Amino acid sequence: MVRKIIKKAKNIFFANPGLLFANEKHLVNKSFYFKGDNNKAVLLLHGWTATPYELRRLGTFLNQNGYTAYAPVLRGHGTKPENLAKVRYNDWLNDARGAFEKLKRKHDKVFVIGTSIGGTISLELAKEKKSIDGLVLMATPYRVKLEELMIAIVWFLSFFKKYRKKFYPPTFGSRKTITRVISYQIYPIANVLETAKIIRRSRKNLSLITQPCFLLQSKSDHIVTYNSLTKIFKKITSEKKQKKYIKRSYHTFISDIKNEHVFKDILKFIESI
């Protein structure tokens, strides 16, 4: 009986990857560009080891509401883990810069939306590009859990192993989620240090962030510290800023839960700017 209740709850709250992209497997590793009609655009930046597909439903929703939605594949992603091994975080920043400039040339307003490391990249981009009209940061780390220990372990392991299988908390179980299906499940150990470098960099000079900003984070995020959202929220100097914690989800809530309410919150925020 208990197992049936748990299974039913998961079906209610978590999106079924089989149903969502049964006919879209050819799109999983692709960038997407949906042309809008209101002369406003959103740049969507995916997380580490993932692909733009984790933001595709959000991009589709925003496009249906008039926005051009563009999500590039960040360097080293959407192919095989070996291609991520030699990528540096500056490569991801350059990808984001190029994508933003592409949108800015053709649109009156451009908003940047990032999830996880995509959110970290968004922070760095916003420090440089004051012409960004607004930010939406999802599951964006100020720190990751046990950060210093994690870095030390990764550094040590890198001398003996090149790749490592992803770890999921026991509460995650064997459940398939969109992120789990589309992401690399084996990653180059050395590249973890690149994520650590850009997270550390993003913590500095957060007062330079003056653009309107909406921060969202899961209450049960198993990767970033619980106070990451509030730390970033307090340190940015945006006059217009708001925050929200998401219930019943893990780190990548934007793709893993039935989250149309989050889509609407994001739309409401960017339309208020």
Image (tube, rainbow, N blue to C red):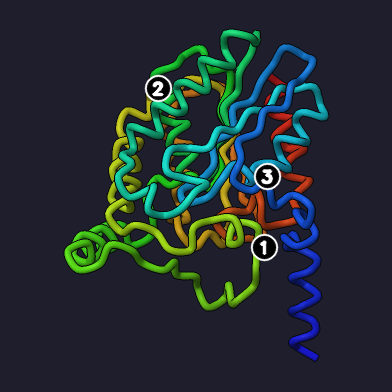
Q: Residue furthest bottom?
A: 1
Which of the 4 image quarters holds residue 177? bottom right
The label on residue 248 is 1
In the rendered structure, are the residues bearing label 2 and label 1 in contact, judged by CB atoms less than 8 Å apart?
A: no
| For residue 217, side relative to residue 130 (left or right) | right
- Tag 3: residue type? Leu
Mark 1 crowdedness (10 Å alpha carbons): few <14, some 14-19, many ≥20:
some
Q: Residue at x 47, y 31 (%)?
A: 122
Number of numbered markers: 3
Q: Mark 2 or mark 3, which has the lower sequence index?
A: 3
Dot 2 amino acid type = Lys
Please state which of the two labelled residues, at mark 1 or mark 3, is closer to the viewer.
3
Distance between mark 2 and mark 3 Cα atoms: 32 Å
Q: Residue at x 55, y 33 (%)?
A: 72
Q: Are marks 1 and 3 in contact (CB under 8 Å)?
A: no
Q: Which residue is mark 2?
A: 127
Residue 1: x %, y % from top left: 80, 91
User: What number is the disc on residue 55?
Assistant: none
**Residue 174 falls left or right of residue 260:** left
Q: Which residue is mark 3?
A: 27
**Distance between mark 2 and mark 1 Cα atoms:** 32 Å
